[in-house]
Image (spheres, helix red, strand yellow):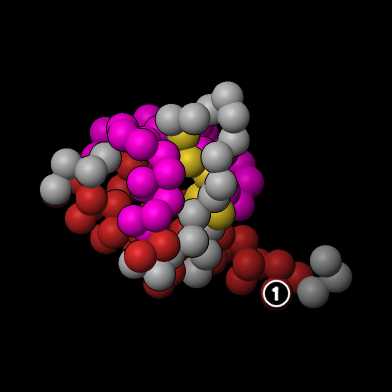
Amino acid sequence: MADAELVGRSVGVNTEAKRIATSTLDELSLEYIPTQTNFIMHRINGDLQAYIGRMRDKGIQVGRPFPPMTQWNRVSFGLPEEMGRWAEALKGMRAVGAI
């Protein structure tokens, strides 16, 4: 925390990752819980385990189930490039009706 430059870069990266996530969820009209952390909870329209499996098949790790929120998924923010891959995977799933 004493390295102000590192903290500033980290906050900037997290802010950009959050922007990618929220703009993607907004574009797809998927509900999410507003966040001030390094992750976001968003609704999945469909089977959560199938969603987790589809993401894993694309090389993307998303959060485990958080009962009783069985229609929601937790996504930790990664680097902006990683969040871009997540966003494209999510859009691809929407295109085929998987979410």
Q: Which residue is mark 1?
A: 6
Q: Secondary structure at mark 1?
A: helix
Tell me the magenta residue range.
27-55
Q: Which quarter of the picture shows residue 8? A: bottom right
The residue sitting at the left extreme is 96
Measuring 20% from the left and 55% from the top, which residue is drawn there? 92
Judge whether residue 23 can be spotted in this image.
Answer: no
Measuring 14% from the left and 48% from the top, which residue is drawn there? 96
The residue sitting at the top extreme is 68
Judge whether residue 61 can be spotted in this image.
Answer: yes
Left of 9 or right of it: where is 94? Answer: left
Measured as percent of width and height from the top left, residue 79 is found at 50, 69
Instruction: Tally the marks.
Output: 1
Residue 95 lies in the magenta-colored region: no
Measured as percent of width and height from the top left, residue 99 is found at 26, 40
Left of 82 or right of it: where is 9? Answer: right
Q: Nearer the viewer, residue 15 or 70?
A: 70
Measuring 49% from the left and 61% from the top, which residue is drawn there? 61
Left of 56 or right of it: where is 28? Answer: left
Measured as percent of width and height from the top left, residue 82 is found at 43, 69
Measured as percent of width and height from the top left, residue 78 is found at 52, 64
Q: What quarter of the picture does the N terminus occupy?
A: bottom right
Left of 40 or right of it: where is 45? Answer: left
- Amino acid type of the residue tagged 1 in the rendering: Leu
Measuring 70% from the left and 74% from the top, which residue is drawn there? 6
